[in-house]
Image (cartoon, rainbow, N blue to C red):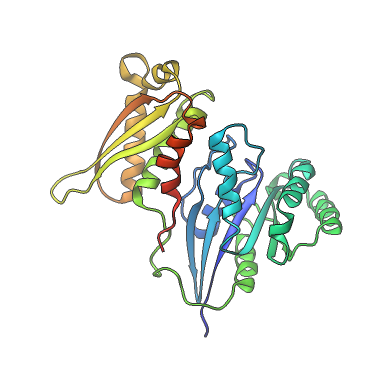
Amino acid sequence: MHKKSGFVSIIGAPNAGKSTLLNSLIGESLSIITSKPQTTRNRIFGILNYENTQIVFVDTPGVLEPRYKMQEYMATEVTASFDEADALLIIYDISEDKRKQLNDIIVKYKSLLRGRNTILVPNKIDLVTKEELLVKIGQIAAIYDFTEIVPVSAKKNFNIEELRKVIINVMPEGEFYFDNDVITSQPERFFVSEIIRQNIFMQYSQEVPFSVFVLIEEFKERENGKDYIKAAIIVERESQKKILIGAEGSKIKILGETSRKKIEVFLNREVFLELFVKVSENWKNDERFIRKNVKPANKPIL
């Protein structure tokens, strides 16, 4: 039996469920999932090995109009994901009337979508009736020409297997890019920083998380002791630093404890985690900061 392999990019509006879909497709938690939009900043590479097929999924930031340099970078991440894509999944929140968002995405990337295997994935179908779902899909199919339309509930893991089959069907023949036991091309320190950032989203109010960048300054593996991880949490203002730390360090202590436990589960070994908070004013608009600290983390390891 011939092997098949390819890259599949997942694109869509913020909070449409892209990261949940990626995690459901590969059966692992790689992308940040919260109720807040714009949590994905980089392309996340997740690898599914299924019988004679290897699929490299690429989770991308939500499609939006950039308001600062960091969001401009996030927009380039979406566009860059088309370069290696053998198929595209456009995920669409079917539970809300957001047809304009879908249309804007198709118009924005019209030239890049042309001639590609493009699969529309109406998501959150558990929140609509069967009749409503059929009507909405019929309306969309009458306007746009997709290779396939596969409705799912990524959160409930409904119809995910059918989506996998459709994706496999359009994958080209070719040797695997990665070994069978590899589930991601990103380094461990990238996911450690994502775990810390996810806990910040969960623990703090809306003001702080979107102004945070987590930089892993040291990552030392030790044969005869716990691994040592030193992480700097970068914020834009002194007021945000005070919020993160909390009275007498109470909040950052909780953040450190919850993050350490999740990191240990992810790495399957004990770690000593040390957190610091630093202020870098307006880092989201600092091209030098983004070029140095954000972009290198995104390169896939091939």
Q: For the point 41% across and 47% down, which residue is it?
A: 297
Q: Where residue 292 appears, x then y in whole percent?
A: 40, 41
Question: In the figure, residue 168 lies in which quadrant?
Answer: bottom right
Q: For the point 45% across and 45% down, which residue is it?
A: 295
**Extreme left residue here?**
224
Look at the image and tell me whether residue 202 can be seen: no
Look at the image and tell me whether residue 91 can be seen: yes
Q: Where residue 148 appears, x then y in whole percent?
A: 73, 65
Left or right relative to 10: residue 26: left
Q: Where residue 26 appears, x then y in whole percent?
A: 50, 59
What number of labels is visible?
0
**Extreme front residue here?**
288
**Extreme bottom residue here?**
1
Left or right relative to 11: residue 206: left
Q: Where residue 271 appears, x then y in whole percent?
A: 25, 42
Q: For the point 61% across and 43% down, which residue is it?
A: 62
Which is nearer the eye, 192 or 234? 234
Question: In the figure, residue 87 lies in which quadrant?
Answer: bottom right
Answer above or below: position of 116 versus 224: below
Which is nearer the eye, 18 or 281? 281
Which is nearer the eye, 6 or 182? 6
Locate the C terminus and report the quarter of the image it occupies.
bottom left
Q: For the point 40% across and 40% down, which residue is it?
A: 293
Question: In the figure, residue 206 lies in which quadrant?
Answer: top right
